[in-house]
Each structure stands twice: as structure tokens, then as C-alpha cells.
């Protein structure tokens, strides 16, 4: 009985995969338009499923139109991961997408999801018993260049807090050199912004 169910499941998944691969570009564009409506209706699971399906079908990016559909669908998938609080998956997808060639407009659109996912991954690493201030700080420093003006301040403050908390709560550190240098960097950055 189990073997039959496994075979049936394998057949169904293979059929769905083949169907997704044979979709025409026009069908995918139409689906992408429908995802905007579903996203506004807060049906993030459905939108995510459609976007990932479109992404699998257009990942090779054989044409500029396919590349555009692929990027749009994956940016929307990143936003859905963010809304569903699946930050690890959103971070990984947005990081992978940031490494590709994107237009300035696409980078700007993707950067919010990239920063949010990394931020919400890093914050729990700075709380509780299983803290990893170094990893949290590395995540935050990675996305800092992509943060908009408001997020830049928030991310920078968390980077400073990660140094402070590491020194404050880690018995390995005896000398407080880093928190002071971070304060100097923040002060210099604030000074530059004031000019």
C-alpha cells in the first residue's frame, strides 16, 4: 500500500513539474499579474507557490522577457517569505538574487526584502541562551549597504548593540575595544550625514 502511494505521489509531482516547465511565457505573465491581486488579498502562501513555480520554469532566462518574469516572480517570492515570517528562506533567495545581474530598479525593489529578512534572522541571534553575536553582526553588516535611510539607522544600531552585548555577556572578552570603535564609526557616519 505504501509503495503504491509513493509511486502515485512521485507521478503527481513529476506531472506537476512537467506542466510547470511547459507553461508558455504569456501564461506565466498572466499568472504574475494574478499574484499581485492575491498579494493584496494577503494570500501569501498561494502567491509564493505560484512565484516559485514561475521561477522554476524561467530560471534559465533564455530571453530578456524570461529574465524579467523570473526576477519579478522571485522578488515577489522574497516579499511573501517576509510576510510569512520565513526569514531564512527569504534571506537565501534574496541573497542569491542579489548576486545576479539586476537593474537598479530591481535591486531597489529587492533590497527591502533582503534587509528585512537578514534583520529578522539576526535579532533572535542576539537574544536568549543560544546567542551568536558574531553571526548576527555579519548578517547585518552584509545587508547594511542595501538598507534605505530609515533601515540604515536601525541596522547600524543593531550592529553596535551586537558588539556591546558580545563584550558585556561573553566572558572571553576582557578588553572593551570594539564597542568604542563602533561608537566612533556611528558618530563619524552621523557627522557626515549632518553635513
Image (spheres, grey):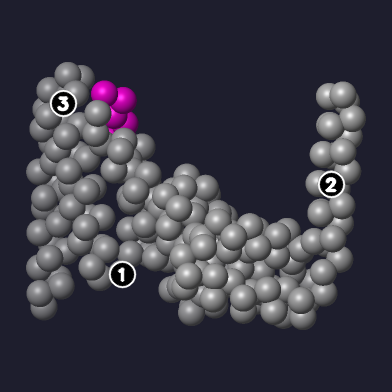
SS category of the residue bearing label 3: helix
Q: Which residue is mark 2?
A: 12
Q: In this view of the protein, which residue sits in the foreground, 75 or 97? A: 75
Q: Which residues are magenta?
A: 129-134
Question: Does residue 98 show up?
Answer: no
Q: Position of residue 10 (x, y in %)?
A: 85, 39
Left or right position of 132 against 117: left
Quadrant in which the C terminus is drawn: bottom left
Magenta-drawn stretch contains 172: no
In space, the residues marked 2 and 3 are separated at their CA atoms by 52 Å
Residue closest to the eye, 19 or 56: 19
Question: Can residue 37 be seen here?
Answer: yes
Image quadrant assignment for residue 20: bottom right
Foreground disc of the pair 2, 1: 2
- Marks 2 and 1, how far apart in space? 44 Å
Q: Comparing marks 2 and 3, which lies closer to the viewer?
A: 2
Count neighbours of disc 3 (C-alpha within 10 A) and say few if under 14, some if 14 to 19, many if 20 or more: few
Residue under the point 51% across and 63% down = 43
**Residue at the far front in the pictured view:** 1
Dots 3 and 1: beta carbons under 8 Å? no
Asked whether 78 or 190 is in front, the reply is: 78
Which label is found at residue 169? 3
Residue drawn 25% across the image and 55% down it = 155
Q: Residue at the location (82% across, 74% down)?
A: 24
Mark 2 or mark 3: name the one nearer the start of the chain.
2
Query: With 10 as the anchor, is 110 left or right in this view?
Result: left
* Residue that numbered label 1 is attached to: 148
Main SS of the magenta part reads loop
Residue 102 or residue 34, whichever sits in front: 34
Q: CA distance from mark 3 to mark 1?
A: 31 Å
Badge 1: how crowded within 10 Å, few (<14), some, or many (20+)? few
Horizontal and vertical percent position of residue 163: 19, 39
Amino acid at each position: 500500500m505504501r509503495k503504491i502511494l509513493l509511486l502515485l505521489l512521485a507521478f503527481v509531482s513529476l506531472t506537476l513539474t512537467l506542466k510547470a516547465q511547459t507553461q508558455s511565457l504569456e501564461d506565466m505573465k498572466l499568472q504574475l499579474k494574478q499574484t499581485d491581486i492575491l498579494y493584496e488579498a494577503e494570500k501569501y502562501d498561494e502567491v509564493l507557490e505560484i512565484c516559485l513555480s514561475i521561477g522554476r520554469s524561467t530560471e534559465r532566462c533564455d530571453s530578456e522577457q524570461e529574465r524579467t518574469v523570473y526576477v519579478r516572480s522571485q522578488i515577489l517570492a522574497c516579499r511573501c517569505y517576509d510576510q510569512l515570517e520565513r526569514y531564512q528562506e527569504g534571506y537565501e533567495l534574496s541573497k542569491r538574487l542579489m548576486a545576479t545581474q539586476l537593474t537598479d530598479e530591481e535591486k531597489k525593489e529587492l533590497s527591502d526584502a533582503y534587509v528585512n529578512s537578514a534583520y529578522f534572522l539576526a535579532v533572535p541571534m542576539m537574544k536568549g541562551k543560544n546567542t551568536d553575536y558574531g553571526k548576527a553582526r555579519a548578517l547585518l553588516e552584509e545587508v547594511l549597504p542595501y538598507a534605505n535611510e530609515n533601515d540604515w539607522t536601525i541596522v547600524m544600531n543593531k550592529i553596535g548593540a551586537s558588539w556591546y552585548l558580545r563584550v558585556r555577556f561573553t566572558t572571553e572578552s576582557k578588553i572593551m575595544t570594539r564597542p568604542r570603535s563602533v561608537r566612533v564609526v556611528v558618530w563619524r557616519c552621523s557627522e557626515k550625514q549632518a553635513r
